Amino acid sequence: MPNKPVEVERRGAVAIVTIDNPPVNALGLAVRRRLMELAEELEADGSVTAVVLTGAGTIFVGGADITEFDRPPEEPHLPDVLARIEASRKPWIAAVNGLSLGGGTELPLACHYRVASPKARFGLPEINIGIIPGSGATQRLPRLIGLAAALPVIAENAQIEARRAVELGLIARVVEGDFLAGAVAFAASVADQPLPTPTGALPVSDPGEAFWTEAAARIGKAAKGAKAPLAALEAVRTGVERGAREGFALERQTFLQLRASEEAAALRYLFFAERSASRPPAVRGIEPRRVAKAGVVGGGTMGVGIAATLLNAGLEVVLSERDGPSLERGLKALEAVFANQAKRKMHSEEEGRARMARMNGIVGLDGLAGCDLVIEAVFEDLALKRDVFATLAKVCRADAILATNTSYIDPKNIAEELPGPTRFIGLHFFSPAQVMKLLEIIPLPQTAADVVATGFELAKRLAKVPVRSGICEGFIGNRILKRYRTEAEKMVLEGVDFAAIDAALRYFGYAMGPFEMQDLAGLDISFLNREAARARGEHVPETMGDILVRAGRKGQKTDGGWYDYMPGGRTAQPSAEVARLLSPMRAAPKTAEPEEIIARLLNAMADEGRKILEEGIADSSEAIDLVEVHGYGFPRIRGGPMFLSARKAGQQ
Ligand code: NAI
């Protein structure tokens, strides 16, 4: 019966149990219930000698049903189902037909044998949603494959492919050819053998203090403040030091505690937000245009990063610059990106060279004729951008998509006199573009639907998180950034020490606070923007930044901005000069608790976010939080300003 989440069929004396719960065969309540019943029924059925457990389709089991996590757990709990299978007197053979994640990896560990298809892959991504495995993996996996191989899977997001799984003893064999027939044959061959020792009862030796210290340092560093990875390590360690019984107990207790935590709620929220981001309802069912060859105009900071991103995703790229020396500089910078990626083991040096080879650097725009998409990243100057697009409109095919990476200029103004504006769109990348995951997609009123769909499709290929933004100054992200900075500066004017503000935000989980950030990025660009606006006759009040830049303090590059730096150094020191320069503008010094500082800045961000929503600039609160997390370093474990604001409102 097709609507049962678990099917049973017979091949001789072997029963085949298939989990068929689309889309990912999650171990939801109905599946757990049925598995529990089947464990009893098949045990009692004298004509069955062995059970093959597999998944329908290309996935074995994608994990728990995360939508259940907002409610208390319902029986039967997964550990009980696994314990029942493990206690069966007939062998259960997990036949892992594809990807197996979370509970999908824990289930085979409780079976008596495991075989897998060549495409199988085992992982335990629980830490990504703020929890640890809750059904025995922290105990069974180290006992089966050893601690050194198990820890990276349990606490560091590593996955194990089928062939490696054989080497490690995670599975008995890889079944080539007819998978189910091979699994059934294997089951028949072990049906009359004595059952092996349950994985949870296998011996494991304690590698000693140095191993644990090194593992804790490594895992803790990668965790970036998240609790789950070190908690997973603790469960493993307890099982090794005090035996599986205590290990299982601590694992379950930790799982339940973390499952109910704010951190896990935030990470679950982002998990769902990210999953739906790449296929928003507005572009569903619309065929995107084909993009194989992309052009990038401007080989500066952004152009180089964008070109690297496109090349990393396998596209052919043409990078255009205005003259030979600029092109050479851009190409050098691009080479440096690949060399750095190779150093970080993201690919081999040879692969870096292969990517460079898919790149063609040109001077001028004529060489962009064959591109399916051209992304403009020249200076932030309206007249220049208009010029570039006027030429591109002549040079490129009529169906080629033309995109601007502008940060602040209204794309409608850029496209004003452009023939065929339906193919024009904003694609706003973030610096460094090869690292930052956010891509703001900014359609104009006249942009064709399939051009928008292509933007989202491209984001997916580039492994970016796309967010549609309407048109306003700074789009979603920079508009909120401006409000955040303004609020931070307001506090400084009220007498709060800016170093205290930076410290509070680091404590909250940002890599740095707003003033350190300005010193790193340079204060001069926004100063020049303000000066340009003043020159146009706009009223732009004097800011503290203006005073600092006029005193020659542009940030780290001048060894001084909000803070002092040793020549060429990056360590921020309080500056007596800054205190003196700014004191006429500031109220008497006053202290503020970190919580107060954080609350004020979060409130300002959420308030701006609500306005952005009301104006239809963003489609949802989730979209705004994705912008903050993926473009502006908002700590992931906190969910986002909109998430936090809604939680706070819910608690009142
Ligand atoms: P940049 O100054 O580093 O690079 C601009 C490049 O464009 C220069 O290499 C220049 O030689 C080249 N260029 C100028 N005119 C050209 C022409 N006619 N043909 C070909 N190349 C030409 O500037 P950056 O920072 O890369 O910014 C580029 C655009 O991206 C701007 O619109 C900026 O607002 C936007 N943006 C910048 C971000 C950042 O963090 N720097 C973030 C997101 C967007």
Image (spheres, rainbow, N blue to C red):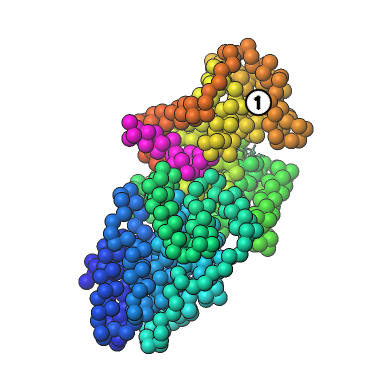
State the image quarter where residue 578 is shown.
top right
* Residue 346 seen in the current view: no
State the image quarter where residue 614 is shown.
top left
Depicted 574 relative to depicted 634: above or below: above
Which residue is at the front of the view, 481 or 443?
A: 481
Depicted 589 relative to depicted 295: above or below: above
Q: Is residue 576 left or right of residue 271?
A: right
Q: Position of residue 458 (x, y in %)?
A: 48, 52
Q: Position of residue 606 (x, y in %)?
A: 42, 31
Residue at left offset 48%, top offset 44%: 636
Which residue is at the front of the view, 573 or 198?
A: 198
Depicted 196 relative to depicted 192: above or below: above
Q: What residue span does the magenta drawing correspond to?
A: 624-652
SS of the residue at dot 1? Answer: loop
Q: Position of residue 95 (x, y in %)?
A: 40, 75
* Residue 250 seen in the current view: yes
Residue at left offset 48%, top offset 26%: 596
State whether the magenta stretch is mostly helix, strand or loop: helix
- Judge whether residue 304 is colored magenta: no
Q: Ligand 1 sits in which quadrant?
A: top right
Q: Position of residue 183 (x, y in %)?
A: 40, 81
Q: Quadrant of the N terminus?
A: bottom left
Tag 1: residue type? Trp
Q: Residue extending furthest top? A: 584
Residue at left offset 64%, top offset 34%: 521
Q: Is residue 280 left or right of residue 535?
A: left
Q: Is residue 357 left or right of residue 269?
A: right
Q: Which residue is mark 1?
A: 562
Which residue is at the front of the view, 284 or 148?
A: 148
Q: Quadrant of the C terminus?
A: top left
